[in-house]
Image (cartoon, grey):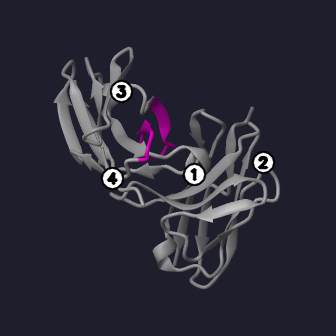
Amino acid sequence: NAGVTQTPKFQVLKTGQSMTLQCAQDMNHEYMSWYRQDPGMGLRLIHYSVGAGITDQGEVPNGYNVSRSTTEDFPLRLLSAAPSQTSVYFCASRGQKGTQYFGPGTRLTVL
Amino acid sequence: GENVEQHPSTLSVQEGDSAVIKCTYSDSASNYFPWYKQELGKRPQLIIDIRSNVGEKKDQRIAVTLNKTAKHFSLHITETQPEDSAVYFCAASRGGTSYGKLTFGQGTILTVHP
Protein backbone atom coordinates (compact mmCIF):
# COMPACT_ATOMS: atom_id res chain seq x y z
CA ASN A 1 0.00 0.00 0.00
CA ALA A 2 1.28 3.44 -0.95
CA GLY A 3 -1.20 5.03 1.49
CA VAL A 4 -2.02 8.64 0.59
CA THR A 5 -0.01 10.19 -2.22
CA GLN A 6 0.10 13.81 -3.34
CA THR A 7 1.59 15.53 -6.36
CA PRO A 8 3.38 17.80 -6.88
CA LYS A 9 5.59 18.19 -3.79
CA PHE A 10 6.43 21.80 -4.60
CA GLN A 11 4.77 24.34 -6.88
CA VAL A 12 5.29 28.02 -7.65
CA LEU A 13 2.46 29.90 -9.33
CA LYS A 14 1.89 33.45 -10.46
CA THR A 15 -1.15 35.34 -9.26
CA GLY A 16 -4.16 34.46 -11.39
CA GLN A 17 -2.89 31.09 -12.58
CA SER A 18 -4.92 27.95 -11.98
CA MET A 19 -3.72 24.49 -11.07
CA THR A 20 -4.81 21.17 -9.63
CA LEU A 21 -3.25 19.45 -6.64
CA GLN A 22 -3.57 15.70 -6.97
CA CYS A 23 -4.40 13.30 -4.15
CA ALA A 24 -4.89 9.55 -4.29
CA GLN A 25 -5.30 6.77 -1.73
CA ASP A 26 -5.23 3.01 -2.15
CA MET A 27 -6.85 2.01 1.14
CA ASN A 28 -10.46 2.11 -0.12
CA HIS A 29 -11.27 4.84 2.40
CA GLU A 30 -14.63 6.58 2.20
CA TYR A 31 -13.57 9.84 3.79
CA MET A 32 -11.11 12.20 2.15
CA SER A 33 -10.27 15.79 2.97
CA TRP A 34 -7.99 18.68 2.13
CA TYR A 35 -6.32 20.88 4.74
CA ARG A 36 -4.04 23.85 4.51
CA GLN A 37 -1.38 24.56 7.08
CA ASP A 38 -0.13 28.07 7.71
CA PRO A 39 2.51 29.00 10.31
CA GLY A 40 1.03 29.25 13.80
CA MET A 41 -2.48 28.34 12.64
CA GLY A 42 -2.61 24.57 12.71
CA LEU A 43 -4.47 22.74 9.96
CA ARG A 44 -7.69 24.16 8.54
CA LEU A 45 -10.19 22.11 6.56
CA ILE A 46 -10.79 23.29 3.00
CA HIS A 47 -13.09 20.65 1.49
CA TYR A 48 -14.26 17.23 2.47
CA SER A 49 -15.80 14.13 0.88
CA VAL A 50 -17.71 11.21 2.40
CA GLY A 51 -17.63 9.14 -0.79
CA ALA A 52 -17.56 9.24 -4.56
CA GLY A 53 -19.82 12.00 -5.86
CA ILE A 54 -20.27 13.65 -2.44
CA THR A 55 -18.33 16.72 -1.32
CA ASP A 56 -18.82 19.40 1.31
CA GLN A 57 -17.18 22.66 2.29
CA GLY A 58 -14.89 23.00 5.25
CA GLU A 59 -13.74 26.03 7.19
CA VAL A 60 -11.85 27.84 4.37
CA PRO A 61 -13.35 26.78 0.99
CA ASN A 62 -13.18 30.07 -0.94
CA GLY A 63 -10.96 29.94 -4.00
CA TYR A 64 -10.89 26.14 -4.13
CA ASN A 65 -12.95 23.50 -5.92
CA VAL A 66 -13.06 19.75 -5.47
CA SER A 67 -14.71 16.76 -7.06
CA ARG A 68 -14.71 13.06 -6.19
CA SER A 69 -15.44 10.93 -9.22
CA THR A 70 -13.76 7.81 -7.78
CA THR A 71 -13.11 6.48 -4.28
CA GLU A 72 -9.36 6.73 -4.86
CA ASP A 73 -8.90 10.30 -6.12
CA PHE A 74 -9.73 13.68 -4.62
CA PRO A 75 -8.12 16.55 -6.58
CA LEU A 76 -8.10 20.14 -5.31
CA ARG A 77 -8.37 22.90 -7.88
CA LEU A 78 -7.19 26.46 -7.39
CA LEU A 79 -9.27 28.57 -9.73
CA SER A 80 -7.26 31.82 -9.76
CA ALA A 81 -4.28 31.67 -7.41
CA ALA A 82 -3.71 34.48 -4.92
CA PRO A 83 -0.72 35.15 -2.61
CA SER A 84 -3.02 34.36 0.36
CA GLN A 85 -3.12 30.77 -0.90
CA THR A 86 0.60 30.33 -0.26
CA SER A 87 0.59 27.43 2.17
CA VAL A 88 1.32 23.75 2.70
CA TYR A 89 -1.58 21.58 1.55
CA PHE A 90 -2.28 18.17 3.04
CA CYS A 91 -4.69 15.60 1.74
CA ALA A 92 -6.01 13.00 4.18
CA SER A 93 -8.12 9.87 4.07
CA ARG A 94 -9.91 7.84 6.67
CA GLY A 95 -11.91 4.62 6.72
CA GLN A 96 -14.77 3.66 9.01
CA LYS A 97 -13.70 4.08 12.63
CA GLY A 98 -10.05 4.14 11.62
CA THR A 99 -7.04 6.39 11.71
CA GLN A 100 -6.90 9.47 9.50
CA TYR A 101 -3.79 9.27 7.33
CA PHE A 102 -2.17 12.33 5.81
CA GLY A 103 -0.32 12.59 2.52
CA PRO A 104 3.20 14.04 2.37
CA GLY A 105 1.97 17.54 1.52
CA THR A 106 2.35 20.04 -1.32
CA ARG A 107 4.22 23.26 -0.64
CA LEU A 108 2.62 25.99 -2.77
CA THR A 109 3.98 29.48 -3.29
CA VAL A 110 1.94 32.10 -5.13
CA LEU A 111 3.89 35.13 -6.33
CA GLY B 1 -19.03 24.91 14.03
CA GLU B 2 -16.45 23.31 16.26
CA ASN B 3 -13.70 25.41 17.84
CA VAL B 4 -10.64 23.80 19.45
CA GLU B 5 -8.30 25.79 21.68
CA GLN B 6 -4.87 24.36 22.55
CA HIS B 7 -2.43 25.42 25.27
CA PRO B 8 0.39 26.09 25.70
CA SER B 9 1.68 27.21 22.31
CA THR B 10 5.25 26.34 23.32
CA LEU B 11 6.53 23.97 25.98
CA SER B 12 10.12 23.40 27.00
CA VAL B 13 11.10 20.52 29.31
CA GLN B 14 14.20 18.66 30.42
CA GLU B 15 14.73 15.11 29.27
CA GLY B 16 12.98 12.75 31.65
CA ASP B 17 10.36 15.28 32.75
CA SER B 18 6.67 14.99 31.93
CA ALA B 19 4.85 17.20 29.43
CA VAL B 20 1.15 18.06 29.43
CA ILE B 21 -0.77 19.73 26.60
CA LYS B 22 -4.40 20.75 27.04
CA CYS B 23 -7.25 21.32 24.60
CA THR B 24 -10.81 22.52 24.97
CA TYR B 25 -13.57 22.11 22.42
CA SER B 26 -16.90 23.82 21.91
CA ASP B 27 -19.16 21.28 20.14
CA SER B 28 -20.79 18.96 22.66
CA ALA B 29 -21.58 16.54 19.78
CA SER B 30 -17.86 15.89 19.14
CA ASN B 31 -16.98 12.34 20.09
CA TYR B 32 -13.56 11.61 18.61
CA PHE B 33 -10.35 13.27 19.81
CA PRO B 34 -7.02 12.41 18.15
CA TRP B 35 -3.56 13.77 18.82
CA TYR B 36 -1.00 14.23 16.05
CA LYS B 37 2.74 14.71 16.12
CA GLN B 38 4.38 16.64 13.32
CA GLU B 39 8.12 16.82 12.83
CA LEU B 40 9.65 19.63 10.81
CA GLY B 41 8.82 19.30 7.13
CA LYS B 42 6.84 16.10 7.64
CA ARG B 43 3.20 15.13 7.61
CA PRO B 44 1.13 14.88 10.83
CA GLN B 45 1.18 11.39 12.33
CA LEU B 46 -1.43 10.05 14.73
CA ILE B 47 0.06 9.18 18.12
CA ILE B 48 -3.04 8.44 20.17
CA ASP B 49 -6.79 8.99 20.05
CA ILE B 50 -9.75 8.71 22.38
CA ARG B 51 -13.48 8.37 21.89
CA SER B 52 -16.16 9.91 24.06
CA ASN B 53 -17.14 6.67 25.75
CA VAL B 54 -13.67 6.41 27.32
CA GLY B 55 -12.14 8.68 29.98
CA GLU B 56 -8.50 7.76 29.63
CA LYS B 57 -6.27 5.85 27.24
CA LYS B 58 -2.61 4.93 27.56
CA ASP B 59 0.06 3.77 25.13
CA GLN B 60 3.47 3.31 26.74
CA ARG B 61 4.72 6.83 27.64
CA ILE B 62 1.73 8.60 26.14
CA ALA B 63 -1.72 9.01 27.68
CA VAL B 64 -4.80 11.03 26.85
CA THR B 65 -7.59 12.00 29.25
CA LEU B 66 -11.04 13.28 28.33
CA ASN B 67 -13.52 15.22 30.44
CA LYS B 68 -16.72 15.43 28.41
CA THR B 69 -18.56 17.50 31.01
CA ALA B 70 -15.91 20.20 30.94
CA LYS B 71 -15.23 19.67 27.21
CA HIS B 72 -11.51 19.33 27.55
CA PHE B 73 -8.90 16.69 26.84
CA SER B 74 -5.20 16.47 27.55
CA LEU B 75 -2.08 14.75 26.27
CA HIS B 76 0.43 13.49 28.82
CA ILE B 77 3.94 12.42 27.83
CA THR B 78 6.06 10.88 30.58
CA GLU B 79 9.84 10.35 30.63
CA THR B 80 10.30 12.72 27.71
CA GLN B 81 13.14 12.14 25.27
CA PRO B 82 14.79 14.51 22.76
CA GLU B 83 13.05 12.65 19.92
CA ASP B 84 9.71 13.74 21.40
CA SER B 85 10.56 17.28 20.24
CA ALA B 86 7.97 18.22 17.59
CA VAL B 87 4.73 20.11 17.10
CA TYR B 88 1.70 18.42 18.65
CA PHE B 89 -1.85 19.02 17.49
CA CYS B 90 -5.11 18.05 19.12
CA ALA B 91 -8.28 17.69 17.06
CA ALA B 92 -11.97 16.92 17.45
CA SER B 93 -14.73 15.59 15.24
CA ARG B 94 -18.30 14.35 15.31
CA GLY B 95 -19.34 10.94 14.10
CA GLY B 96 -21.57 10.02 11.17
CA THR B 97 -20.98 11.93 7.93
CA SER B 98 -18.67 14.32 9.80
CA TYR B 99 -16.43 11.46 10.83
CA GLY B 100 -13.40 12.49 8.77
CA LYS B 101 -13.91 16.21 9.34
CA LEU B 102 -11.35 17.17 11.97
CA THR B 103 -11.05 20.58 13.61
CA PHE B 104 -7.50 21.15 14.83
CA GLY B 105 -6.02 23.16 17.64
CA GLN B 106 -3.28 25.67 16.87
CA GLY B 107 -0.46 23.36 17.90
CA THR B 108 2.13 23.13 20.68
CA ILE B 109 5.84 23.25 19.96
CA LEU B 110 7.46 20.83 22.40
CA THR B 111 11.20 21.05 22.96
CA VAL B 112 12.92 18.41 25.08
CA HIS B 113 16.40 19.46 26.21
CA PRO B 114 18.98 16.69 26.74
Q: What's the distance in space between the residues labelled 1 and 3, CA to CA?
A: 22 Å
The amino acid at mark 4 is: Ser
In the picture, measured across the screen, residue B4 lies left or right of residue A46, that is left
Q: Which residue is mark 1?
A: A105
Q: Quadrant of residue A14?
A: bottom right
Q: Nearer the viewer, residue A40 or B20?
A: B20
Q: Which residue is mark 3?
A: B83
Q: Which image quarter is the C terminus of chain B in? A: top left
The amino acid at mark 1 is: Gly
Q: Which image quarter is the N terminus of chain B in? A: bottom left
Circles 1 and 2, Cβ within 8 Å, touching? The answer is no
Q: What's the distance in space between the residues labelled 1 and 4, CA to CA?
A: 28 Å
* Magenta segment boundaries in residue numbering: B29-48
Q: Quadrant of residue B87?
A: top left
Disc marking residue B26: 4
Q: Secondary structure at mark 1?
A: loop
Q: Earlier in the sequence, mark 1 or mark 2?
A: 2
Q: Secondary structure at mark 3?
A: helix
Q: What's the distance in space between the residues labelled 1 and 2, CA to CA?
A: 17 Å
- Verify whether residue A106 appears in magenta: no
Q: Secondary structure at mark 2?
A: loop
Q: What's the distance in space between the residues labelled 4 and 2, CA to CA?
A: 33 Å
In the picture, measured across the screen, residue B24 lies left or right of residue B90, that is left
The disc numbered 3 marks a residue on which chain? B
Residue A102: x and y, percent? 58, 44
Residue in the picture at 69% in, 72% down: A19
Same chain for marks 1 and 2?
A: yes
Residue B50: x and y, percent? 43, 30
Q: Which residue is mark 2?
A: A72
Q: Nearer the viewer, mark 1 or mark 4?
A: 4
Circles 2 and 3, Cβ within 8 Å, touching? The answer is no
